[in-house]
Image (spheres, rainbow, N blue to C red):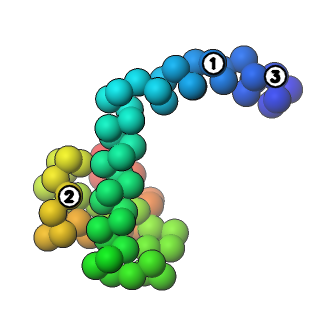
Amino acid sequence: MAKNFRDRYRPYDKAYQARPEQKKARANRNAARRLAIKKYGKAALKGKDVDHKDGNPMNNRRSNLQIMSAKKNRAKH
């Protein structure tokens, strides 16, 4: 049953992920993670999320990034 569900929604997911605003958001998340890896190291980020202190996901200054557990970060938003 799970396979049928995935097959049914795959065209929607592809269309959604291909939208320019989604590509920009994904690129921004990846950029934030890369900067945090440079600042804290890859081992420190294992199983954690990169949080933006000011709440603006487009602000990727190193001073604005912090490591937070996934549970706390997702509860924050």
Which residue is located at x 28 percent, y 79 percent? 39
Decide which of tag 3 and tag 2 comes sooner along the chain. Answer: 3
| Extreme residue toward the right, this view | 1
Instruction: Identify residue type, mark 1.
Output: Pro
Badge nearest the viewer, 3 or 2: 2
Above-or-below relation of 24 to 14: below
Q: Label 1, on which residue? A: 11
- Mark 3 and mark 2 in contact? Answer it, CB < 8 Å: no
Q: Is residue 43 positioned above or below 36 on the image?
A: below
At a point 20% along the width and 47% down the height, the residue shown is: 58
Q: Distance between the residues labelled 3 and 2?
A: 39 Å
Q: How far apart are marks 1 and 3 (CA)?
A: 13 Å
Query: What residue does disc 2 label?
Result: 60
Does the CB distance between marks 2 and 1 fall below 8 Å?
no
> Which quadrant of the figure contains the N terminus?
top right
Question: Residue 75, can we see it?
Answer: no
Crowd around label 2: few <14 · some 14–19 · many ≥20 (10 Å): some
Q: Is residue 46 left or right of residue 36?
A: right
Q: What residue type is labelled 2?
A: Asn
Q: Where is residue 54 in the image (x, y as percent from the top left)?
A: 14, 55
Q: Which of 49/59 is in front?
A: 59
Near mark 3 (Cα within 10 A), the count class, few <14, some 14-19 or many ≥20, is few
Percent of width and height locating residue 43? 48, 82
In percent of width and height, residue 2 lies at 80, 31
Q: Residue 4 carries which label?
A: 3
